[in-house]
Amino acid sequence: MRTATATVIALTLAAGIAAPAASASGTNHTVNGLWRMDGYGTVLALGHRTYQEYQTTAVSCLKGDTARRTGPGTYTVGGDVLTVRLGRDGDHATLGAASAVGHRKLVRISTLPAACTHPTPKDPLTSFDVFWQSYEENYPFFAAKGIDWHAVRDEYRPQVHKDTTRAALFDIFSRMVRPLYDAHVAVQDGDRVFAEGRPGTEVPSEELDAKVKKFIKTRDLANAPYRRDFANGRITYADLAGGGRLGYLRISGFDGYLPDEEASYAAQLAELDRALNTVLTPERARHLHGLIIDLRINGGGSDALGIHIAERLTGTPYVAYAKRARNDPTDPSRHTRPEPIPVIPASAPRYTGPIAVLTGGSTVSAGETFTQALIDRPGRTIRIGQPTQGVFSDVMERELPNGMTAWLPNEEYLTDSGRTFDGTGIPPQVTVPVFTKEEFDKGQDSAFDRAMNLLGAGH
C-alpha cells in the first residue's frame, strides 16, 4: 500500500491527475495515478480524463503520447484503444492495446521521477545524450550485431557542441545507427527520415508493391476463375485453375485496410473480417485442398490482425509465440517474463488444410510475426522463398529534446524453444529466388510455382 502524502497530491494534481482513492483496507480502486511500466522506460500519468506518457532514461524525462479517456480504464489514441486493468491489490495493473498483442505490466509509484518535474535542455549535446541513452537502455541486439555502443558514443560525442547544426546532428545520429541494419531503427526530423534495412533486401514501398501485384495478376493469376481485391487493395484472393482446389491469398500489409488514414483499429478489423468472410465461406473451406499465402511484399502493421487471420486457419488452439521486452537499463540480458500469445480457433468458418507461405526479404515486421505464428500451426504448413527481413518488435518512438524522433525495437518474439529470428529473419524450408531481376526478366515466379507443385495442383 502507498499512502498519498501532501507531496504526492501536489504532484498528481499538477499533472492533472486526481490522487488515487483507497478503501479502508488500503486497496486502491482506481487506475488514476502514476505508474511505472515494467520495461519500455515509461511512466504513465492517468487521470479522470487524461493519459500522459513520460519517456524516461537515466538522463532524461520527456513527454510522449497523450490519449483521451473514453471509458473506465480505456483510452483512445490515434484510432487505437488502450485498456488498463487494475490488479487485485490496486498497486499493479496491465496495459493492452487493441492493435497489439501482449500486455505491459504496471506498478503504481508515488511520485514522478525527478527528471520529469523540470524541462530537459534542448541543446545538441543533451539531445545526443538522450539519443544514445535511449538505445543503451532499450535496444536488445548490440551483442548479436557485434556493435560496441559505448565505442560509438566515444567516437561521435566529441563531434557535438553547442553550435552543431540540426542537419549535422541528424547526420551524426544516422551514422551511429547505420551499422545496425535494422529496419525498425530510424531517425526522423520532420520529413527527413533515415532508415536502413538488412543488406541484400528491399524494404517494401508502394512502387514495389504495385509492380509485384501487376506481375502476379498477369503471370500467376491470369487463368484464375475467381479473383478479387479487398481491404483497400491490401488483400487479394483467387481460386486457382485446376478445379479450384487451390486458393491464393496475398496480404501486402496488416494495416491500411481503409482509404481513411485515420481509420480506427476496430474499423480495420471489421474490414478484414468482411474480406475473410467473403473468402472463407463454409463451402470453400471444405473444398480447398491447399492455400498459398503470399507475404513476399508485406510492410507490416498490426500483429493483432495477423493473429486474427491465424485464428481462421486452425481448428486447434496453440501458441503463436511468446513476447518479452528488455527491462533492465544496465543489463541487456534481462527481460520481462515471456507472455505466450495464443491462437484460438475462430467461431467463423475456418480453413485447416495444407498451407504454403511465401516469404522474402521484403516480408517485414507484422508480416514476420504472422509468419512466425504459422510455424507451429497444427496441420501441414511449409515456408517457401527467402528469409524474412528480421525485425519483429513493436517500434519504440522516443522523442528527443530538440524535437527529433528516434525509433527502435526493444522486444523479442520467441519460439517454443526460446529462439528468436531477429537480424537473420525466418528462414524458408524451401529456398528459391524471390522477385529477382532475372525472375522478372524471364517472367518466372519460382516460389509460386513451387507452392503449386508442393500443394498438388490438379491432383
Image (cartoon, rainbow, N blue to C red):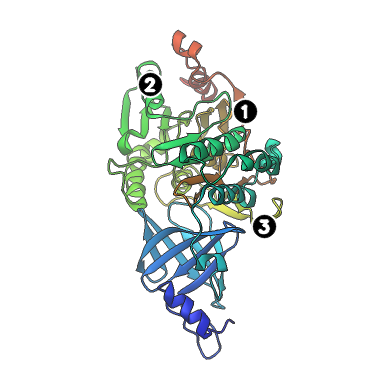
Q: Nearer the viewer, residue 412 or 190?
A: 190
Distance between the Cα atoms at labels 2 and 1?
Answer: 26 Å
- Chain-order first, disc 2 or disc 3: 2
Residue 328 image label: 3
Residue 310, compared with residue 251, is above or below; it is below
Q: Is residue 193 visible?
A: yes
Q: Position of residue 188 (x, y in %)?
A: 46, 41
Front: mark 2 or 1: 2
Q: Quadrant of the N terminus?
A: bottom right
Residue at 45%, 74% in the rendered image:
32
Residue 429 image label: 1
Residue 337, compared with residue 394, is above or below; it is below
User: Which structural element holds mark 1?
Assistant: loop
* Residue on which the image places disc 2: 211
Distance between the Cα atoms at labels 2 and 3?
Answer: 44 Å
Callout 2–callout 1 Cβ contact below 8 Å: no
